[in-house]
Image (spheres, grey):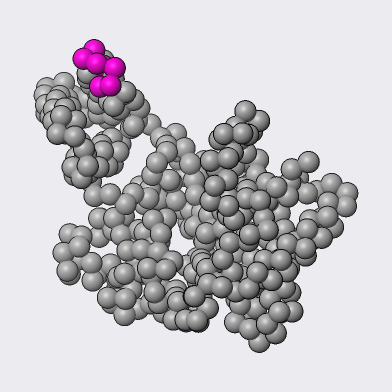
Amino acid sequence: MEQLVRCRYKITIKFDSSFDRPLSFIAEVLEKCGHPWTRSVFAHVVQVCQGVIDSKFGRLASAENKRDDLITKTLSVLEDSIAATSPVAKVMFSVMSTLGGPRGWDRESVVSSVRDWVTGETTLFSGEGQRGEVAALLNDWMPKWVGQGVLGDARKLGFEEYSRDFMRWGTPPGCSPTQRELQYAIDNGIISDKSERVGLRTKTICGMLSVLVGDSDDLLKKSDICHATLKEETKMCVIISTPMWSYVRMCYILECLQKPAFLSSTLSRDDMMVQFTKYYSMHYVAIDASKFDHNVPKWLLKDMWTALRTALSNRFGEGNELVRLCDDLCGELDDLVIEVLGARIKYEKGLLTLCWTAGHIRPTYSTLSAP
């Protein structure tokens, strides 16, 4: 299970427990921008926990595999003590005791979660005539988007040049370094050994290493394999990352087309969240990922790429580079496989962790699905 955990931060607090990552993250943030008083109090918290672990009771708890329980109780007592000093301190140091503890995951539950996400039936737009209505909307939207003019300067570079500029597409979400990149990081002291490779798992870092090593083609080579990971910010969340091959293609298309000004969504209007909070928050209904991301039919994604391809072809011709990239992305949907803990699951449905999800495609599809 440990191999699935995604964490970008170096582990500096080593209690040999599930609290190591979250506490190390807090320590790193406080070191960079924390108030001296906050850093001092947190250092004392870590010191007390270390003292408890090194005590006779700590050694006994470790022998009985109850170290997490001991740290949980220690942090809970410290929280109460700190909270008694002031309301501000109470807020700043609350819920530390909940950062670790049992994850509730085993191999079967992770594989089952991924399987439920990407296989089976969907109910979204399954009503009579709804697919035709969706197709009509897409065929209306895509020409409007392309009709704005392809203004992004990325198009001047061309896709090949763009794909080698990691500063354009690099983001915090995960990416696994190639073997050459991993060895380069070790040889140059970026990490001490392979056990610290989790600190390299961001698209920006992998992109930078690919330039230094000279293996960009290897990092971005054609692949139909998606990988599932356990999200570092939560105890109970699986995310699925699409191949870098398709991710960079989507980034290029988005940067070329720019924001669809005609669309009322967070993708096109920067002020939308401000207006939403001011005027519409009382009517807000959250969209549960298990009810939406896990329920997007594959045909909807294929229809989207097909409609965009048609609009681009009508405007720029069949030989246009963006048309070819749409064909690549649409065709890939039939070949995608998710690998997780030795299991290979054929992709049948679901909105994966693409660059078109958070704040982009999700609110747009939400508009589509609204009554």
> Which of these two is toward me, 12 or 160?
160
Q: Is residue 146 left or right of residue 357?
A: right
Q: Residue at x 18, y 42 (%)?
A: 31
Above or below residue 12? Residue 81 is above
Q: Quadrant of residue 113?
A: top right
Indicate the position of residue 265 as horizontal and vertical percent values: 62, 50
Q: Residue at x 60, y 74 (%)?
A: 150
Residue 86 is one of the magenta-drawn residues: yes
> Which of these two is toward me, 294 or 283?
283
Above or below residue 279? Residue 321 is below
Tell me which segment is drawn in magenta.
Answer: 83-89
Residue 357 visible to an observer of this rendering: yes
Q: Exactly how many numbered labels are in the figure? A: 0
Q: Residue at x 70, y 47 (%)?
A: 367
Residue 109 is one of the magenta-drawn residues: no
Q: Is residue 337 left or right of residue 93?
A: right
Indicate the position of residue 253 as horizontal and vertical percent values: 57, 70
Indicate the position of residue 201 as horizontal and vertical percent values: 35, 58
